Image: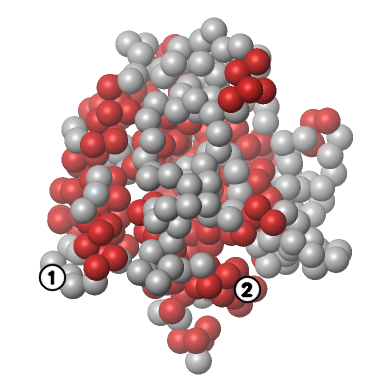
Amino acid sequence: MIQSDPVIEWLLDSDPSIRWQVMRDLLDAPDREWMAERAKVETEGWGARLLSCQDEDGQWAGGAFLPAGFDALEWKERGQPWTATTFSLSQLREFGLDPACGCARRTVELIGASARWEEGGQPYWEGEVEECINGRTIADGAYFGIDVSPIVDRLAGERLDDGGWNCERINGSVRSSFASTINVLEGLLEYERSTGGTHRSQEARRTGEEFLLARNLFRRLGTGEPADERFLHFLHPNRWRYDILRALDYFRSSAILTGNNPDPRLGEAIEHLRSRRLRDGSWQLDGSPAGRVWFEIDDGQGKPSRWVTLRAMRVLRWWNAQPSINA
C-alpha cells in the first residue's frame, strides 16, 4: 500500500485497532493484510492493555455493569464508571479483537459462567432489563459468537409505537429516545451480520431506522428543532451516548450489509459532518463521557482525534461513492 495523504499516514501511525480499520475501510487493502493487522489487537497496544486488566473469572473490575464496591457518590461526583465488563467488552469489539481467537473464546465462556447483572442477578448472556444495555449485549454477544436470540426477540417486542426504543419505557415513557434506539439498532445489525437475522429482527431494525431517519438523525419530529445540540458534537468513546456520527457510521454499516443505497434524509447530517472538518483534514474530539476508565485512547477534548477522523472519513467515502446521491 502506497499512501501520500498526510491524514491517512497520521491514522496509520497509531494503534493496531485503528490501523486495521484504515486498511480495510479507507485503503481497500487485501483481506489477508488487514486481518493480519487486526490479529495484533490481541497482543499489542490498547487491545492487549485492556485484556491485561481482566479479572481471572473473565470479568473486568469485578462487575457486569458496575465495578465491584462501586459507591454511587462516584457517579455523582466523577461520572459513570466505564471499567466493568459490559463497557470493556464493547471496547474490545470496537478495537476489533478477533472473535475466533482463543483469548476471545475464553473470555465469553468465563463471563457466561461468572458474570451476573447487578440489577437482578441474571446470567450475563441472558441480558438485563434496560434496552440500551441489552442492545450492547446483543452486539457484543453476536460479535463474539454467543446465541443472543432470546434478547433479540425481547427487544423486538419492546418497541414503542413510534418504532424505536427507550430505556425509560419501564417507567412509563411512550416516546423513543435517540440513544436507546441507536444502541438497539447496533445490536440488531451485529446479530443480522452474524446470523442473518430473522424476519422479526429485520422488521424491528427497519422501524428503528425510520425513527431516526424521519428526524434527520437529530431533529424533533414535531418542531424540526434539534432534539439536543449535543447530538451534533462528536464523542469518543460514545459508550451509550448518541451523536450523528455514530448514527451515520451505523447507516453506513447497515447499507454495506444489505446492499441498500443511502437514504437522502442522511444528507443534512452529512453536510454537518463535512462542515466540521479541520484545515488539516482531520476532525476534532468534542468530548468523552466523564467517569472512571482503564486508560485514555484519544488525545483529549478539542484536539484532532484519530477515532473521530477514521469514522468520519469512512462515512464520507461511502456517501461520496453513491452516484444517485451525488448526481
**Tag shown at residue 2:** 1
195 lies above or below 212: above
Q: Is residue 173 left or right of residue 319?
A: right
The quadrant in which residue 79 appears is: top right
SS at mark 2 in the image: helix
Name the image quarter holding the N terminus.
bottom left
180 lies above or below 162: above
The quadrant in which residue 44 appears is: top left
Residue 231: image location, x then y, percent: 64, 55
Q: Is residue 158 left or right of residue 104?
A: right
256 lies above or below 290: below
Q: Amino acid at mark 1?
A: Ile
Nearest the eye: 322 or 188: 322
Q: Earlier in the sequence, mark 1 or mark 2?
A: 1
Residue topped by disc 2 = 268
**Can residue 50 be spotted in the picture?**
yes
Residue at point 44%, 36% (across, down): 90
SS at mark 1 in the image: loop
171 lies above or below 281: above
Check disc 2: other Cα within 10 Å, few if <14, some if 14-19, many if 20+.
Answer: few
Residue at point 27%, 28% (across, down): 49
Residue 247: image location, x then y, percent: 56, 57
